[in-house]
Structure formats: structure tokens, C-alpha cells
Amino acid sequence: MEGLYLVARGFALPEQAGLLAPYPARYLGTLREIWPTRSGHLRVLLGDLLFPYPAATAELLAQIDEFLTAGPADPGMARVLTERRDTLQRALRSRALPLEED
């Protein structure tokens, strides 16, 4: 499991945002596929590790909102998505702030 963690963290470095650009659109589909195939902590960990933080977009935020309001989902998956959604929303607000000049 340590190897999985290290590879995922190396993959999601901020300087890799360009390489990660295609992944936000694939995140929810991938999470839906792996969720029933893993158990407990591992699927929660994968939900976090696979989240494309550096390349996350407002479109992904909208997709998560749509997914969460579409109907019943596994409560654990809904919680993971709600937590990732909150982090994504904060990141998008932060990116929108003006840069300070020295």
C-alpha cells in the first residue's frame, strides 16, 4: 500500500497539472468503478489519492454536485466526494484571488 501512496502522490504534484489535464473528467467514472471492488479504508484512500487536485476545475465541481444530487449513492463514497468537493471549492476560490505585488 505504501507503493500505491507514493506513486499517487508523485503523480499529483502541482507542477504536473498539464499532464493531469485529462483526468478531472475521468475521476468520477473511475471512482464508481473501483469503489465496489475495494473495501473500507482502501477505497477511501483511493478516492483521495486519485483526486486530480492540481488540475481540478469548476467543471469537476459541477460534476460532483450533479453526482451528489442525482440520487442515492454509497454513503462512504458520498462522504469522500463531499470532502473532495469542499477542498476543490477552496482551491478554486484561492486560485481566483489576485496576486500580491512586491
Image (cartoon, grey):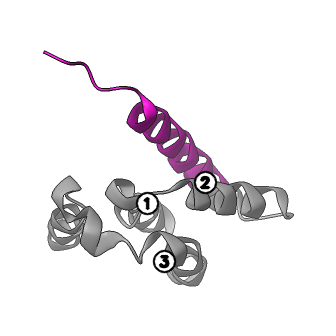
**Residue wearing tag 3:** 38
Q: Quadrant of the C terminus?
A: top left
Numbered label attached to residue 31: none
Instruction: Bin the neighbour count of mark 2 within 10 Å (Cα to Cα): few under 14, some 14-19, many 20 and up.
Output: some
Q: Are marks 3 and 1 in contact (CB under 8 Å)?
A: no
Q: Position of residue 5 (x, y in %)?
A: 22, 64
Q: Are marks 3 and 2 in contact (CB under 8 Å)?
A: no
Residue type at mark 3: give it: Arg
Q: Quadrant of residue 13 in the image?
A: bottom left
Residue type at mark 2: give it: Leu
Q: Earlier in the sequence, mark 3 or mark 2?
A: 3
**Residue wearing tag 1:** 41
Task: Write the start and end of the magenta stretch as one range.
Answer: 78-102
**Residue wearing tag 2:** 61
Q: Which residue is at 27% across, 68% downward?
A: 18
Q: Position of residue 66 (x, y in %)?
A: 76, 61
The residue mark sitting in front, 3 or 2, is 2
Q: Position of residue 52 (x, y in %)?
A: 38, 62
Q: CA distance from mark 3 to mark 2?
A: 24 Å
In the picture provided, is 78 more to the left or to the right than 53?
right
Q: CA distance from mark 3 to mark 1?
A: 9 Å
Q: Earlier in the sequence, mark 1 or mark 2?
A: 1
Residue type at mark 1: give it: His
Q: Quadrant of the N terminus?
A: bottom left
In the picture provided, is 102 more to the left or to the right than 51?
left
* Secondary structure beneath label 3: loop
Q: Which residue is at 40% across, 67% downward?
A: 46
Q: Which residue is at 50% across, 56% downward?
A: 57
The residue mark sitting in front, 1 or 2, is 2
